[in-house]
Amino acid sequence: MQKLIKIQITLNQELCISCGVCSALHSKAFEPDSKTNKYKVTPKYQVIKVTQQELEQLQQVAQACPVQAIKIKIIKNGNVN
């Protein structure tokens, strides 16, 4: 059984330039926001438990963002570290 890691994903829409890299790389976690015409984290992925492999994929998405608008925080014991 794989250990699941609880994470919180945020996307700063003020920084977002609507390039779509996040959604292209991980369409389950990121989607267009019809109100702002920028991207946002899908509700399911705002706080979620993921495998180490998926965490690494999401970290790669965050690194691929040209304006570094995506942040991923690991949550331990109810605290965000």
Image (cartoon, rainbow, N blue to C red):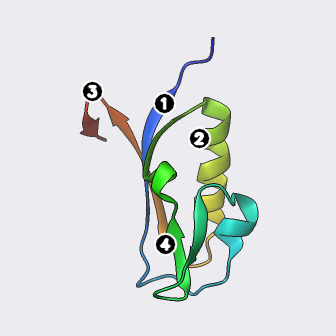
Percent x, y of residue 38? 54, 83
Tally of numbered tags: 4
Are discs 3 and 1 less than 8 Å apart at CB? no
Q: CA distance from mark 3 to mark 1?
A: 11 Å
Query: Residue pushed farthest top?
Result: 1
In three-dimensional space, the C-alpha distance between marks 2 and 4, rounded to whole angstroms, equals 17 Å
Q: Nearer the viewer, residue 60 or 43?
A: 43
- For disc 4, the marked residue is 69
- At 49% from the left and 50% from the top, the residue drawn is 44
Residue on which the image places disc 3: 77
The numbered mark at residue 55 is 2
What amino acid is found at the position of numbered circle 2 in the picture? Leu
Q: Secondary structure at mark 2?
A: helix
Q: Quadrant of residue 61?
A: bottom right
Mark 3–mark 2 distance (CA, rounded to whole Å): 18 Å
| Front-lying residue, 17 or 39 | 39
The residue positioned 60% from the left and 85% from the top of the image is 18
Q: Where is residue 30 drawn, in percent x and y?
A: 59, 64
State how far apart marks 2 and 1 are (Cα).
8 Å
Disc 1 packing (10 Å; few <14; some 14–19; many ≥20): some
